[in-house]
């Protein structure tokens, strides 16, 4: 039974998406004998199961919930996301993919690695496992954890998010204690050919993210964060899947394959830039003269057919508009080989800046805040970080606001899901006074971008009634795959849509 489950997850991992290098291995991954099962056979399928989900099924709603994205003229695929809606059906694919493809394979990899004392591989699998589980917590709050993935227990209990976070930190510490920087790691795409040193840095960055989200819920966490920062052993390059995508169906960046590649089977174009992010990155005066243009803008969004940057409004697809057709809107910049980012250097620097801000060390906070913006521009392949810093300078008195807005912009073109998480935690950007109905008057079919205040959010047109005005969707409802046969599944009420997770209270 275990053999069948393992093999099926490999096949599912390949079906979901695959890096072309994985097709070059010399052993048939669809039918290895159980005695010949190795960590190098299992790791690529586990990686792709998570990357396909995180880089697509979490990224797309994250972009809408962060108001990086609005909806294209006339299409309907994600209008619900743009209205801050998430349904149990919608959330099911991501939940199942992470659990059945990613976590199941990683569990087997960890068991094999521990048995054979492959401690570099053990650390790699543990780090990916903790990364994926944290993403589930950040979507749902409470999830099966301590009793999860046990086929003999169809009704695992749901552990509270803070309990899961603590468990993840313990898992990372235990794996780090066993691995040395020179330890080899099974075949993988994230750090192909590298030894455990890069996985150690990734694990440390993940620990920093987890603990930074715990602030306010765990009293002693700042001392632990300070000790981790003092070690200064974080990634010096973005942790991302970069060189493994191919320009063929089934081998592309998963988000590109879903939304941009006609070979995927659909020519429908759905995602466009949102006025909120465009009008923050491209600011004009009362006469319409540009007073600030973010150097990352062309790296994050394409111009429209008229050569301009224009963003749409959350909560509508302009289906009744006679003026704002598909060619009017800007699209995200994406290619078949675009990276799937897990943790960027900029994110780590923002977390470090936030730590020093809490310690009232304004000089160190500003140093790392500026370093975060510099890293974001470097990741986008552009110069001009000093221009961004001048437009969004660090202020100790309002450090959550300036870090929150700058991080929201930095993640707009790279990691929309993490942006949604940080919006909920930092509370910035905050909601402004203008609403979606103020920004677009459907009666007169007119956009009013002059009413938008840069660095703010707004209530979508036709916002989901369980969320309401001036609020974010705080958590996803559980899919039936998680709850239908589990007597321990928690009830999800209408108020839960706007009940913050433990780290966002």
Image (tube, rainbow, N blue to C red):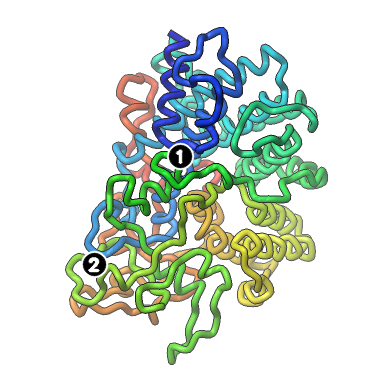
In the structure shown, which secondary structural element does the residue marked by tag 2 occupy?
A: loop
Q: Quadrant of residue 268?
A: bottom left
The residue indicated by pointer 1 is: 52
| Horizontal and vertical percent position of residue 23 | 50, 31
Label ID, residue 35: none
| Image side of residue 385 versus residue 257, left or right | right
- Residue at position x 49%, y 76% from top? 282
Front-most of residues 435 and 334: 334
Q: Quadrant of residue 468?
A: bottom left
| Image side of residue 358 versus residue 469, left or right | right
The residue indicated by pointer 2 is: 318
| Horizontal and vertical percent position of residue 324 | 26, 73
Q: Is residue 92 above or below residue 35?
A: below
In the rendered image, the quadrant that contains the N terminus is top left
Q: Is residue 170 above or below residue 36?
A: below
State if disc 2 and disc 1 touch (CB < 8 Å): no
- Residue at position x 52%, y 70% from top? 297
Q: How many marks on residues? A: 2
Q: Is residue 468 above or below residue 435?
A: above
Which badge, 1 or 2, comes first in the chain's sequence?
1
| Horizontal and vertical percent position of residue 390 | 66, 77
- Residue at position x 65%, y 76% from top? 387
| Horizontal and vertical percent position of residue 119 | 72, 22
Front-most of residues 160 and 421: 421
Q: Would residue 170 be visible to someone looking at this image? A: no
- Residue at position x 37%, y 45% from top? 497
Q: Would residue 351 be visible to someone looking at this image? A: yes
Alpha-carbon span between mark 1 and mark 2: 30 Å
Badge 2 crowding class, 10 Å Cα cut-off, few under 14, some 14 to 19, many 20 or more, is many
In the structure shown, which secondary structural element does the residue marked by tag 1 occupy?
A: helix
| Image side of residue 122 versus residue 335, left or right | right
| Disc number lying in front (1 or 2) | 1
């Amino acid at each position: 039974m275990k053999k069948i489950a393992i093999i099926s997850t490999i096949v599912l991992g390949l079906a979901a998406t695959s890096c072309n290098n994985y097709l070059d291995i010399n052993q048939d991954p669809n039918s290895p004998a159980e005695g010949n099962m190795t960590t190098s056979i299992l790791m690529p399928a586990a990686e792709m199961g998570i990357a396909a989900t995180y880089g697509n099924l979490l990224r797309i709603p994250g972009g809408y919930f962060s108001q990086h994205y609005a909806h294209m003229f006339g299409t309907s695929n994600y209008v619900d996301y743009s209205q801050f809606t998430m349904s149990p059906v919608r959330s099911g694919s991501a939940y199942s993919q992470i659990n059945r493809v990613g976590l199941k394979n990683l569990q087997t990899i960890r068991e094999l690695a521990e048995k054979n004392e492959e401690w570099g591989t053990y650390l790699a699998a543990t780090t990916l496992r903790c990364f994926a589980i944290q993403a589930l917590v950040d979507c749902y709050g409470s999830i099966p954890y301590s009793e999860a993935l046990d086929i003999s227990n169809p009704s695992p209990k749901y552990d509270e998010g803070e309990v899961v976070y603590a468990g993840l930190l313990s898992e990372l510490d235990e794996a780090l204690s066993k691995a040395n920087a020179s330890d080899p790691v099974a075949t993988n795409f994230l750090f192909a050919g590298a030894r455990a040193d890069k996985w150690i840095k990734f694990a440390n960055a993940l620990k920093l993210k987890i603990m930074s989200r715990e602030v306010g819920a765990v009293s002693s966490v700042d001392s632990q964060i300070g000790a981790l920062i003092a070690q200064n052993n974080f990634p010096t390059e973005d942790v991302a899947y970069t060189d493994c995508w191919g320009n063929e169906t089934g081998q592309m960046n998963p988000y590109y394959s879903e939304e941009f590649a006609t070979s995927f089977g659909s020519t429908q174009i759905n995602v466009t830039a949102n006025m909120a992010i465009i009008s923050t990155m491209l600011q004009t005066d009362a006469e319409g003269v540009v007073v600030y243009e973010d150097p990352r803008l062309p790296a994050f969004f394409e111009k429209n057919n008229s050569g301009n940057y224009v963003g749409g409004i959350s909560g509508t697809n302009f289906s009744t508009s006679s003026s704002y057709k598909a060619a009017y809107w800007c699209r995200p910049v994406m290619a078949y080989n675009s990276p799937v980012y897990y943790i960027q250097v900029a994110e780590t620097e923002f977390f470090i800046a936030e730590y020093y801000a809490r310690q009232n060390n304004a000089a160190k906070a500003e140093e790392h805040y500026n370093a975060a913006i510099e890293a974001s521009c470097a990741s986008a392949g552009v110069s001009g970080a000093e221009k961004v810093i001048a437009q969004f300078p660090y202020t100790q008195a309002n450090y959550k606001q300036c870090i929150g807005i700058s991080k929201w912009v930095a993640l707009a073109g790279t990691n929309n899901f993490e942006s949604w998480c940080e919006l909920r935690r930092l509370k910035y950007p905050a909601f402004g006074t203008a609403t979606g109905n103020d920004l677009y008057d459907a009666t007169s079919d007119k956009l009013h971008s002059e009413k938008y205040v840069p660095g703010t959010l707004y209530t979508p047109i036709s916002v989901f009634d369980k969320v309401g005005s001036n609020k974010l969707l705080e958590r996803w409802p559980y899919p039936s795959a998680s709850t239908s046969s589990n007597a321990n599944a928690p009830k999800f009420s209408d108020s839960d849509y706007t009940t913050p997770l433990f780290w966002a209270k």
